[in-house]
Amino acid sequence: MIRMNKQTLSRSCIAIGICMLIGSAWAQDAAPKAAAPAAAPTAAVQGSAAAGQKIAQSGTPQGAAACATCHGAKGEGMAGFPALAGQHAGYLARQLQHLADGSRQAPVMAPMAKALSAQDRADVSAYYASLPLPIQPVRGPLPKGKDDDGAWLVERGRWADGIPACAQCHGPGGVGVGADFPAIGHLTADYMQSQVAAWNKGQREAGPLGLMGKVAQKLTPADIQAVAAYYARLHGASTSSSTSTSTAATATASAPAKP
């Protein structure tokens, strides 16, 4: 009887031991795996303005066309293509990255951005940032009446619709503020409208806190025209435009009539 008890006890101990081993294995499998150490943040790529100038003027062997072809010899912009001169390097590099990864959609620019390496993007951004911005940080007088919608939107905003003043984010005269708020005071109404449409369609990132995506939904085409016209007057573009128009009109009047 005692012998049987010893055998039984021995077998029981073995069984308990096996159960403990199995239980331990199950516990290890069920325990959450330790998270892999987070990857170290990628260091910001430092751009070279000299290298960026070569890209801007000649393109790259990888297929990116010369930026000057569309954006002008000095980044002054052309019809349908915005001015780049004087924009913040961080803003330009981020937009190129978005165009390359598809988070900003633009059929013409996307292939160019994809053909640029991270270093290329940093270089060309540094180059354009080194050029002088063609507008000055001037602020117009606060409008007292809403007879000028452009002045009201730029200097005061339209808070009833949740639209802050353009100057609050983009600076006086629309000269831009840092890497998040670009210079807009010299953009054409057509280009502004195309970007508002892109935000409304989810074709480009809406900026810090999604602010521009929300504002774009509330801006009408008439608002965009008014804002662009106000900036043009503020920076004297309307004066030169009027002079050109007047000169053209005088030349036309003095020219012989066509049959």
Image (cartoon, grey):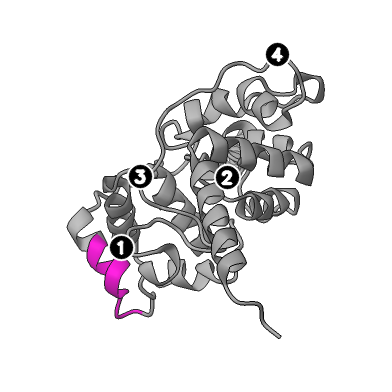
Q: Mark 1 or 4, which is nearer the eye?
A: 4
Residue picked out by circle 1: 120
Residue picked out by circle 3: 86
Q: Is residue 55 magenta?
A: yes
Disc 3 is placed on an element classified as loop
Depth order, front residue of 229/85 = 229
Disc 1 is placed on an element classified as helix
Magenta span of residues:
53-62
Q: Quadrant of residue 138?
A: top left
Disc 2 is placed on an element classified as helix
- Outermost residue to the left: 50
| Residue 239 relative to residue 226: left or right | left
Q: Mark 2 or 3, which is nearer the eye?
A: 3
- Pointer 4: residues within 10 angstroms few (<14), some, or many (20+)? few
Label 2 amino acid?
Ile
First in sequence, mark 4 or 2: give its number.
Answer: 2
Q: Is residue 173 above or below residue 30?
A: above
First in sequence, mark 1 or 4: give its number.
Answer: 1
